[in-house]
């Protein structure tokens, strides 16, 4: 994914996977703020590197995919008092002009939302939008489909301080691995011995995790992408457990083995949506490790309710459904008396207890 006019060439498979992840998460995110009691009268969806809309073969980029998600919910939006704004920006005036043409060609300009396009550099556009994003009455989804890492780095602290804001950011994780000895890179790393090359994205995630404010709960997730010999990735952030749960759901839809990559990131010989059973039986290591840790925590009574379980799910990068087999097993053994098998982030303020014996 070299830096060039992206619509002059076809999207790579890893780029298509990345775009699919963006679209899947947006589809999960948007209806949360459209149904039931309206807590956030303003919804802002921002794509800061929207490009021209398509690749050389006419396949949709992030901006058109986001608008297609909005089209899926146009009836709900039209009959809802919520104001939805879509901000699409790119520093290239040519790309923005092409994007506007493609929006009209797809008739997305007729959607019941306000679409704002700007030919501005990321830092300028984010600076203009930051006061709006920081409003307590606004729910925000940010797509930072950058090259490298510098743009997310320059605004990460400001983004995580916005009250109800989820973000998906593309990062070139191999950049950390390849140049980790340089002072300007080394300062990001948790230590000076990065993990194996194929796990470079986790180094990037650890670097961002170090910068999270201590006074506020915040969740980070990741999805790694391999293109040729390079490792790229998507960093996700949300202050709400429901956001983290929906990101993991989207990631596991793309990678049914580990929920974390478009390649065999755990070096287990399987990846993607291949059969999750090993040649000699069993389950992927990532799920096994989680199940073992969850069982230990419940038996030790350090895991007492569903938010405790969810936190463990998030730490291991697994979906809440992965907890069900352990909960059923321990219920049969009389370790707990809960009548539910899957922790639900919607109960985060009043989590259901396990009723440990």
Image: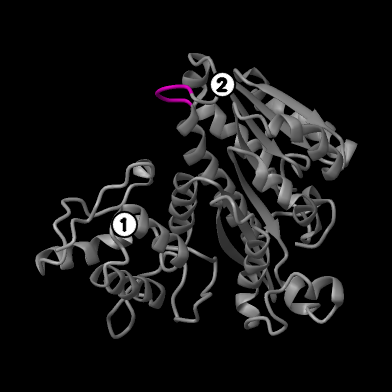
The secondary structure type at the circle numbered 2 is loop
Q: Position of residue 48 (x, y in %)?
A: 75, 42
Q: Position of residue 263 (x, y in %)?
A: 54, 71
Marker disc for residue 41: 2
Using the image as rendered, state which of residue 46 and residue 107 is in the foreground. 46
Residue at left offset 51%, top offset 65%: 260
Against 33, is 179 above or below?
below
Using the image as rendered, state which of residue 168 and residue 267 is in the foreground. 168
> Considering the image in quadrants, where does the N terminus appear?
bottom right
Q: Position of residue 106 (x, y in %)?
A: 65, 27
Residue at left offset 69%, top offset 36%: 46
Marker disc for residue 340: none
Against 160, is 355 above or below?
below
User: For the view shown, which residue lies furthest in the front direction?
Assistant: 215
Label 2 to label 1: alpha-carbon separation: 32 Å
Using the image as rendered, state which of residue 105 and residue 234 is in the foreground. 234
Which comes before the other along the chain, label 2 or label 1? Answer: 2
Q: Is residue 35 magenta?
A: yes
Marker disc for residue 321: 1
Colour scheme employed for the rendering of this structure: one colour
In this view of the protein, can residue 61 be seen by the observer?
no
Q: Is residue 54 magenta?
A: no
Q: Which residues are magenta?
A: 34-38
Residue at left offset 20%, top offset 51%: 340
Q: Position of residue 187 (x, y in %)?
A: 79, 72
């Amino acid at each position: 994914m070299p830096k060039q006019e992206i619509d002059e060439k076809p999207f790579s498979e890893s780029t298509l996977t990345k775009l699919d992840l963006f679209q899947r998460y947006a589809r999960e995110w948007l209806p949360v703020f459209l149904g039931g009691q309206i807590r956030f009268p303003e919804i802002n969806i921002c794509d800061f590197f929207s490009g021209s809309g398509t690749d050389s073969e006419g396949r949709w980029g992030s901006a058109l995919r986001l608008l297609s998600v909005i089209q899926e919910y146009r009836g709900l939006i039209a009959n809802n008092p919520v104001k939805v704004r879509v901000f699409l920006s790119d520093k290239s005036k040519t790309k923005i002009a092409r994007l506007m043409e493609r929006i009209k060609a797809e008739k997305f300009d007729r959607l019941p939302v306000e679409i704002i396009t700007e030919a501005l550099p990321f830092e300028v556009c984010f600076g203009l939008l930051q006061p709006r994003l920081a409003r307590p009455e606004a729910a925000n989804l940010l797509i930072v489909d950058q090259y490298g890492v510098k743009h997310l780095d320059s605004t990460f602290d400001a983004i995580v301080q916005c009250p109800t804001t989820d973000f998906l950011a593309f990062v070139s994780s191999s950049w950390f691995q390849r140049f980790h000895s340089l002072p300007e890179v080394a300062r990001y790393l948790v230590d000076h011995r990065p993990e194996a090359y194929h796990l470079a994205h986790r180094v990037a995630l650890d670097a961002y995790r170090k910068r999270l404010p201590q006074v506020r709960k915040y969740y980070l997730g990741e999805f790694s992408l391999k293109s040729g010999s390079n490792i790229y990735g998507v960093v996700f952030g949300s202050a709400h457990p429901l956001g983290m749960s929906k990101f993991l759901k989207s990631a596991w839809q793309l990678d049914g083995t580990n929920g974390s990559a478009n390649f065999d990131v755990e070096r287990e010989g399987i990846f993607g949506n291949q059969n999750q059973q090993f040649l000699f039986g069993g389950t992927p290591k990532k799920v096994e490790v989680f199940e073992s840790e969850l069982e230990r925590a419940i038996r030790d009574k350090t895991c007492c309710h569903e938010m405790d379980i969810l936190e463990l799910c998030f730490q291991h990068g697994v979906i809440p459904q992965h907890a069900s087999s352990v909960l059923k097993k321990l219920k049969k053994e009389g370790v707990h008396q809960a009548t539910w098998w899957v922790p639900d982030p919607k109960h985060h303020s009043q989590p259901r207890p396990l009723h440990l014996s």
